[in-house]
Image (cartoon, helix red, strand yellow):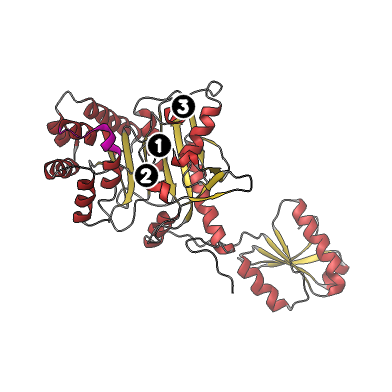
């Protein structure tokens, strides 16, 4: 018996309906905020992800050598592909860009709740905007999505920080710029690893106990007033975060937001504001995460363009919706089931099905000789609105018998009336 690869999923029709329902909400939130869809190949050059060594993602690639001797990989995330696309048309693309995508991504990592080796990821990015209005536009789209699937601020919290908070504090105690990105990767795991493991990993970077204490104290800051006390009233970072909150007030989404200095995100390319959406109960992995990455293009040899974005996987959100009882019961979406009482009426049934389809109705024609009882059960199972029956008596008058499955009413109609 063949089994699917570990960490992957099959989508049977009922699961596919649910996936399409979720994706429709992603698409709706993106389009309501004026974002345009793009896509790229699932297969990318391995170098696109390994140009910066030391990141966790480089050890999780599904990479191999193709028949032409090139090192390639299944994409683990979308942002580097987007950066490649922007770089290829850097002088021709009108800024700002507001783009979204829904790619399938692959990472070979340890299986756990909310984490698969393949998943679909809703990505939204804004390029060419320096101020906090870009981040707030992304946060508004997130809040719009959550509200659209029935979740509220009591279900989901969006934790916001700025990487420069930790960076400025660490610079003051002698931590080098080269050490900062590895520190963020470790700090990003703090909610998943024991404290002694985190301290051991920080010590391996050459950080002594006093620096570790400073990191822990910084990460515990929980509001902007306390942050201002720590960084000073003239702090640029504090001013920009307060500006972000003011814009969020304008959008009416500030009730979803919390300041949390512990959010740093593990990817090295983030340069400023970072955020994560989490379930309010704190029982699941992060639902999504993102931030500002203004210097990404220069790592490809290009001229930097201010940018920010987020990635939103399809796994954790479905767990949260299930816990909240918000998974919808989705019927098959069939309008009509057409059933012939006998093989002699097969041609007439096809004629009726063709006439209905020509009018845009979704029609399932029963393809084999079956009993009427089976046809009724089949129509109910498909979630059909009507059962259209070709019977000898009615067809002699060029009519069909139609049963409305919701009301139970029956009527005899011509094909034109049907």
Q: Which residues are magenta?
A: 173-181
Near-viewer residue (161 or 19): 161
Callout 3 crowding tier (Cα within 10 Å): few <14, some 14–19, many ≥20: few
Residue at point 54%, 62% (across, down): 15
For numbered disc 1, what is the local secondary structure?
helix
User: Residue 276 appears at what percent x and percent y?
Assistant: 33, 44
Q: Is residue 3 magenta?
A: no
Near-viewer residue (385 or 73): 73
Q: Residue under label 3, please give it.
A: 301
Q: Residue under label 1, please give it.
A: 138
Front of the two marks 1 and 3: 3
Q: Earlier in the sequence, mark 1 or mark 3?
A: 1
Say whether residue 229 is left or right of residue 156. Answer: left
Q: Residue under label 2, please give it.
A: 55
Residue at point 37%, 38% (across, down): 139
Callout 1 crowding tier (Cα within 10 Å): few <14, some 14–19, many ≥20: many
| Image quadrant in which the C terminus is located | bottom right
Kindly report the distance in space between the C-alpha atoms of the residues bearing marks 1 and 3: 27 Å
For numbered disc 3, what is the local secondary structure?
loop
């Amino acid at each position: 018996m063949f089994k699917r690869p570990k960490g992957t999923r099959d989508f049977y029709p009922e699961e596919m309906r649910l996936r399409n329902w979720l994706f429709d909400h992603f698409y709706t939130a993106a389009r309501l905020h004026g974002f345009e869809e793009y896509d790229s190949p699932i297969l990318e050059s391995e170098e696109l992800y390994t140009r910066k060594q030391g990141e966790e993602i480089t050890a999780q690639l599904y990479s191999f050598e193709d028949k032409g001797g090139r090192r390639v990989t299944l994409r683990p995330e979308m942002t580097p592909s987007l950066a490649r696309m922007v770089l290829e048309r850097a002088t021709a693309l009108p800024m700002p860009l507001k783009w979204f995508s829904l790619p399938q991504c692959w990472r070979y990592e340890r299986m756990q709740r909310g984490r698969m080796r393949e998943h679909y990821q809703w990505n939204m990015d804004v390029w060419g905007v320096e101020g906090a209005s870009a981040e707030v536009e992304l946060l508004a789209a997130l809040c719009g999505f959550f509200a659209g699937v029935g979740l509220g601020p009591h279900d989901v919290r969006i934790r916001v920080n700025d990487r420069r908070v930790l960076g400025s504090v660490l610079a003051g105690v002698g931590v080098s710029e080269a050490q900062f990105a590895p520190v963020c990767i470790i700090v990003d795991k703090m909610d998943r690893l024991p404290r002694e493991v985190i301290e051991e990993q920080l010590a391996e970077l050459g950080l002594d106990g006093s620096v570790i204490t400073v990191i822990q104290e910084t990460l515990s800051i929980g509001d902007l007033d306390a942050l201002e006390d720590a960084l000073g009233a003239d702090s640029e970072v504090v001013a920009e975060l307060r500006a972000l909150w003011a814009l969020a007030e304008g959008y009416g989404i500030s009730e979803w937001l919390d300041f949390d200095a512990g959010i740093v995100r593990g990817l090295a390319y983030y340069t400023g504001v970072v955020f994560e959406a989490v379930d309010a109960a704190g029982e699941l992995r992060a639902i999504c995460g993102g931030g500002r990455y203004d210097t990404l293009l220069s790592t490809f040899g290009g001229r930097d363009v201010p940018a920010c974005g987020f990635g939103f996987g399809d796994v954790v959100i479905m767990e949260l919706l299930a816990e909240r009882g918000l998974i919808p019961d989705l019927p098959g979406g069939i309008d009509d089931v057409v059933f012939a009482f006998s093989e002699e009426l097969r041609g007439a049934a096809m004629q009726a099905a063709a006439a209905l389809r020509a009018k845009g109705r979704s029609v399932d024609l029963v393809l084999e000789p079956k009993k009427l009882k089976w046809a009724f059960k089949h129509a109910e199972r498909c979630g059909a609105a009507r059962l259209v029956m070709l019977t000898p008596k009615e067809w002699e008058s060029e009519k069909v018998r139609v049963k409305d499955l919701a009301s139970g009413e029956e009527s005899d109609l011509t094909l034109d009336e049907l």
